[in-house]
Image (spheres, rainbow, N blue to C red):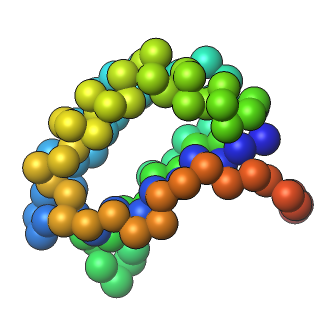
Amino acid sequence: MICALTVRKLKPGTYEQFRDAFMRDFADNPPEGFVRFHMVRNSDDPDEVIAFGFFDGSPEQLRAAAAKEGYAEQLERIAPFVESVGADGLYEIVEERTA
């Protein structure tokens, strides 16, 4: 299982525009293999947004699915609203616990 995670600092007051651009195609048609997706905002700084999702497959399979589903185009759509990007990568789930 892979976790795709990106931390973004948005330009002030652009969250709704960012969200609409980010979710436009993803909401109704996530790439095959995605198990779950979350977008969270920092409660002290609503312009800091973290998007992460869980993918059942390898990093190579996720990259192929993202390319097929237009990830590059998604990045172009959201670029006008993003001030900076922090952590951004594919992370292997090495431990999981649930209540």
Q: Residue at x 43, y 19 (%)?
A: 69
Task: Work out which quarter of the rendered image holds the N terminus and state it.
Answer: top right
Does residue 72 lie above or below 17 as drawn? Answer: above
Task: Work out which quarter of the rendered image holds the C terminus and state it.
Answer: bottom right
Q: Residue at x 75, y 52 (%)?
A: 92
Does residue 86 lie above or below 98 as drawn? Answer: below
In this rendering, position of residue 65 left or right of residue 71: right
In this rendering, position of residue 15 left or right of residue 38: left
Decide if residue 36 is in sight here: yes
Decide if residue 20 is in sight here: no
Q: Percent from the top left, x then y, of residue 83?
A: 19, 65
Q: Percent from the top left, x then y, of residue 81?
A: 15, 54
- Locate residue 94: give its quadrant: bottom right
Does residue 47 lie above or below 50 as drawn? Answer: below
In this rendering, position of residue 65 left or right of residue 94: left
Q: Percent from the top left, x then y, of residue 21?
A: 22, 36
Q: Residue at x 26, y 66 (%)?
A: 84
In this rendering, position of residue 96 left or right of residue 69: right
Q: Residue furthest bottom?
A: 44
Q: Which of the pair 97/81 is nearer the observer?
A: 81
Q: Which of the pair 91/28 is nearer the observer?
A: 91
Q: How many marks?
A: 0
Q: Residue furthest front?
A: 60
Q: Percent from the top left, x then y, of residue 61?
A: 66, 26
Does residue 92 lie above or below 59 as drawn? Answer: below
